[in-house]
Amino acid sequence: MAIRTKDLIDLEFLSAAEIQEILNTAKPMKEVMGRDIKTVPALRGKTVATLFYENSTRTRLSFELAAKYLSAGTCNISASVSSVKKGESLQDTGRTLEAMGTDIIVIRHNMSGAPKLLGEGVKARVINAGDGTHAHPTQALLDMFTIEERKGHIEGLTVTILGDILHSRVARSNIWGLTKLGAHVRLCGPPTLMPKEVEKMGAEVFYDIDEALNGADVVNVLRIQLERQEKGMFPTIEEYAKNYAMTEERLKRAKKDVLVQHPGPMNRSIEIPTAVADSAQCSVEEQVTNGVACRMALLYLMCGGETLV
Amino acid sequence: MSFLVKAKGIQTEIMTKDDIKRALIRMAHEILEKNQGSEDLALIGIRTRGIFIAKRLAAIIQQVEGTTVAVGTLDITLYRDDIAAKGGIPIVGGSDVPFDLNGKKVVLCDDVLYTGRTIRAALDALFDLGRPAFIRLAVLVDRGHRELPIRADYVGKNIPTSYREAVVVHLREADGEDTVVLEQYKD
């Protein structure tokens, strides 16, 4: 089965079966990554372009390596050093990439909706690598893959997402994906950082961290995005850390074998103290490895076969 | 491997349960004879039914020689030459070769040998996992129509076929019964 839609904008638009197919395919991809010879010829002759309008090291590198491990050609375009500086529109940039023979465009943009707009303007398949505060589907896929690997299943688990839900595209994509695969999702953070009517996505909202952690199987600790905190949504960093940091003490509320996730990069002095960040319960490094495997799976499923739309 | 349209035409059984059993016993003996024993031998089955052929050959060798032969699984999906072709994308099952391939005497196992393209892909996949001493090929059925210069070293049964026929191998591990059927495509 391939991915039905031309573009991957968010998990919202994938079926549970499609999400599961990506996770299942990521498993043999991880095996490939563990070999001495880490490349397979599956996408020989295909070209993947990463078009990043926002700073990123791990996501860009992860996509680039995923493409390389599948033998696809790769090229990277940073908005800061490209024609974007000269005022070229997003769709024109996309069409230029396409005219040079790009099969897949991976885009990160600070504006929500940019990947959709790009996808509408090009025939190449577009993958959203994070757009504004909207979605980050591949991060959610790798979080879910890591959960499945550690816990054996996703259905029936209680996953608490902690932190700045309002600005978090990671949280939104995780809510779509996890609820589709049958997990119970709890959201917890300061009221000023909780989006209105988020319950409609199928998640439960908590403002008390101890309640939110009670009996949780997984805690996904979001990064406090200092770059998106201009309006004073909470008084001080210290106060946020006092009320919402994922401390060892608070973690005792969760199940004994709780899995702690973090999308990185970690603020050890704010949301995730070192004692928890470096514990065996925390899967930060595995998530990075699994991110490459999940992106290999996605590229494979989107490069081969045809779209039905 | 092509995406066969399930034919509802004439079906003829060309190997029975006992035929399959006898063929595998003979092939196991041929493998042991040619290798002069089971030392350094490794049987690698190509997903899906090649795995069961490899396991059964290993079980027979175990009975005959009293030695345990290394058995592995090879998934060739990522090495196929037709991934981008029409008809949907094949599922990646994953390889599992839990031993060092370097210097091993590998016998690649599959159910049907047809165009040879699967075997070409399998050879590429194997070389990415290590450097065997040599690779030989064992198949339950050779139906001809090769498109590449590949031949089998151990063959259960040679079956001359036409392009309008399909050879369908059923093995009890996957299909509940042991039988090989020749199906005629309908117009």
Image (cartoon, helix red, strand yellow):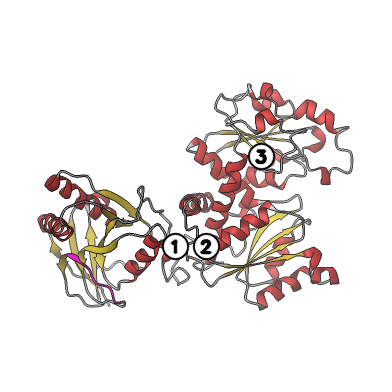
Whether the residues at callouts 2 and 1 have beta carbons within 8 Å, the answer is yes
Percent across and percent down for residue B14 are 14, 65
Say if labels 1 and 3 share a chain: no
Disc on the earlier residue, 3 or 2: 2
Given residues B177 and B153, the one toward you in this image is B153
- Image mark 1: chain: B
Residue occupying the point 22% across, 63% down: B139
Whether the residues at callouts 1 and 3 have beta carbons within 8 Å, the answer is no
Residue occupying the point 52% across, 34% down: A156
* Residue B87 visible in the picture: yes
Q: Which amino acid does label 2 sit on?
A: Leu
Given residues A20 and A244, the one toward you in this image is A244
State left or right for residue A186 relative to residue A20. right
Q: What residue type is labelled 1?
A: Leu
- To which residue does mark 2 refer? A70
- To which residue does mark 1 refer? B78
- Image mark 2: chain: A
Q: Which amino acid does label 3 sit on?
A: His
Magenta stretch: dominant secondary structure: loop
Image quadrant containing the C terminus of chain A: bottom right
The CA span between labels 1 and 3 is 31 Å
State left or right for residue B112 relative to residue A57. left
Q: Is disc 3 placed on a helix, strand or loop?
A: loop
Viewer-nearest of discs 3 and 2: 2
Q: Look at the image and say whether residue A40 sits in the magenta stretch.
A: no
- To which residue does mark 3 refer? A262
Which portion, as a residue range, is magenta? Answer: B149-155
Percent across and percent down for residue B41 are 24, 53
Given residues A208 and B133, the one toward you in this image is B133
The CA span between labels 2 and 1 is 8 Å
Percent across and percent down for residue B61 are 16, 49
